Image (cartoon, rainbow, N blue to C red):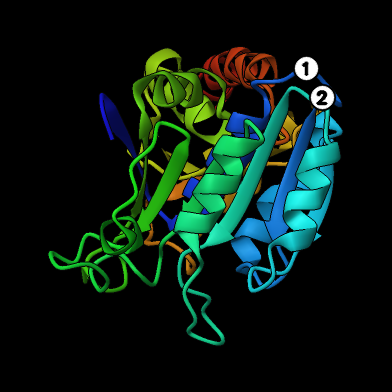
Amino acid sequence: MPDARALFFSTGYLANINAITGISRLAEQGQASIYSAKLNHASLIDGVRLTSAQTKAKINLFDHQNLDLLEEALKQDTLPLKLIVVDGVFSMDGDIAPVEKLLHIAEQYDALLMVDDAHGFGVLGEQGHGILEQADVHSERIIYVGTLGKAAGVSGAFICAAAPFIEWLIQKGRPYKLIQIWNEEMNFSRWEKTPSSTPIQPVILGSNANALAAAKLLDEAGYWIPAIRPPTVPVGNSRLRITFSANHSADDLRELIKTLKSIEKHVESNL
């Protein structure tokens, strides 16, 4: 893939959610169609449903073993953004997606093709590079997701795509964008952020009293952020457990940051 870049995530689930929701935002509300294989993995299904709820994208299901209905539907589709979403290797049956045919259809009807190769990366292809190597297909239309926690034996996942798509996901893929904003803009004077590339962002307050007081003030401000205390965590490591989701906007996060900074000053001055 010419001029390709990759984006790393802590899990395949997060990569899939980010890819589908982010790419679908290339179009205006209600101006995208998602074509999802019926037997896709649950993380792809969740990403498609979340995208539909957020962007009003139209969902269409297709049989990956019979592409005639997919082609017919795309032929009738006049929306500006069309995204085909498919597993590379289907996890329950072990069969392989016909990516060469899917790419041909995508090119014919001006669609993008997203392939989650969780069970193919490290296995398929002469070098183990996955289903795209095995099928010998290359295209700037492809958004490729690889999982590192299976054949590679480590952890995490990545999205690989043409550079403009990756840059778009950095800016518009909500889970990735929120973590980026949090890391850059949330600085505590006495509390401690625990570095994490996941939606779970712990803030260490130390004592039980600090954690409970902060959680109470957050609740009064309209935020449900639980105080986690011993024996769940070690003594002296009581914390706030902040969890981001794709439903949160950048503005939501910045309001939370402002609230946390105010609460930190109040809690530390009154305890």
Amino acid under disc 1:
Glu
Residue 174, percent from left and from top: 59, 29
Picture quadrant where residue 156 is located:
bottom left
For the point 83% across and 27% down, the residue is 78
Mark 2 residue crowding within 10 angstroms, few (<14) / some (14–19) / many (20+): some
- 246 vs 227, nearest the viewer: 246
Q: Is residue 214 visible?
A: no
Label 2: which residue? 31
Residue 70, percent from left and from top: 74, 55
Q: Mark 2 and mark 1: span between their CA atoms?
A: 5 Å
Q: Is residue 142 visible?
A: yes
Task: State the SS at label 2.
Answer: loop
Residue 269, percent from left and from top: 53, 17
Mark 1 residue crowding within 10 angstroms, few (<14) / some (14–19) / many (20+): few
- Which quarter of the rendered picture does the C terminus lie within? top right
- Lateral position of residue 80 relative to residue 128, left or right: right
Label 1: which residue? 28
For the point 38% across and 37% down, the residue is 139
The mark found on residue 47 in the picture is none
